[in-house]
Image (cartoon, rainbow, N blue to C red):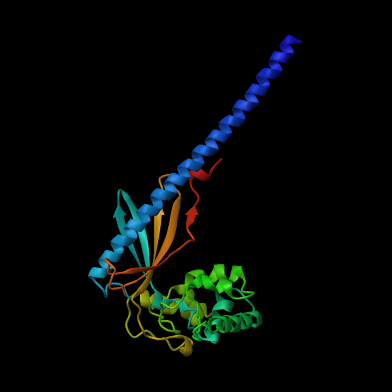
Amino acid sequence: MALVAVLWITAALSLMLTGMTGSVRQEVRAATSARQFVEGRAQGEAAINIVLQQMAAQPASITQQAVVAVPYRGINVQVQVLPMGGLIDVKSASPELLQALFVIAGGLAPGPATAAAQAVVQWRTRPGSTGQPLGLEAPEDLMLVPGFPYDVYARIAPLIAAGQSSGGTVNPLSAPSAVLLVLARGNAAVAARIAAARDARQVGIDLTQLEASFIGGSTSRAYRLTANVPLPDGAGMSFSQSITFQASAQSELPWRILQNSGAISVTPGTTDRS
């Protein structure tokens, strides 16, 4: 009986040790991920600031979507720069443009998309205490519109701005491919042709197959920059920052931060493995 008791105690201790070892490993992975997250964000912010300094020195250097490789402390951070004039401004876009956005990029059926577009227009034009329309101050303010579906917002979030683009129309020469698809009313061949010609720096691009009421030629000094940072374990993280070069007189920098994205994505790496 004593031998049996010893064997049971040994087995129990082994199980406890195994459980403690697994718990410690999980804590180590969590701590490693947290440290890499903080370091990765700092590296991404530094890379964005380097690109902004270059843009401030050469104001006309980026007029359409571009990717800038920034070597920083032994890693290569890819910074995507997107002029916000190429995004759809939910603060001033027409109901027709909003409806096309909700159908083509948001995945809504035409009927619900029309209703959602009308709801957004009614919400942004409601008067405030001064009698002036309250508008939409940030893209995520769409979620304040009664009944607006979150899944639609999640799909269109990379394609929209609020008050920092070209006043209701979109500059197709600055627009990402997904926005071009909306401007082409879902015609993928047209959107691809224009994107290819633009990326090849062709002049005199034929835009006649885009919806004329959706497009304009104005430019914006506001940009959305997204830093994609490789992490040591093979994972990667990215986050966005929206800025404008219309800085206030009190600012020590030639740009002003409009928004730091709360949506930080992390691609899997070895720290996610069990």
Identify the residue at image location x=26%, y=66%.
252
Q: Nearer the viewer, residue 236 or 162?
A: 162
Q: Nearer the viewer, residue 150 or 212?
A: 150
Identify the residue at image location x=58%, y=73%.
144
Quadrant that contains the C terminus? top right
Q: Quadrant of residue 120?
A: bottom right
- In the image: residue 91, left or right of residue 22: left
Identify the residue at image location x=40%, y=64%.
241
Q: In which quarter of the image is residue 250?
A: bottom left
Q: Residue furthest front?
A: 129
Q: How many marks?
A: 0
Q: Is residue 129 above or below residue 273?
A: below
Image location of residue 141, percent across then percent down: 53, 72
Image location of residue 98, percent across then percent down: 54, 81
Image location of residue 59, percent across then percent down: 26, 73
Identify the residue at image location x=64%, y=74%.
147
- In the image: residue 106, left or right of residue 111: left
Image location of residue 237, percent across then percent down: 44, 54
Quadrant that contains the N terminus? top right
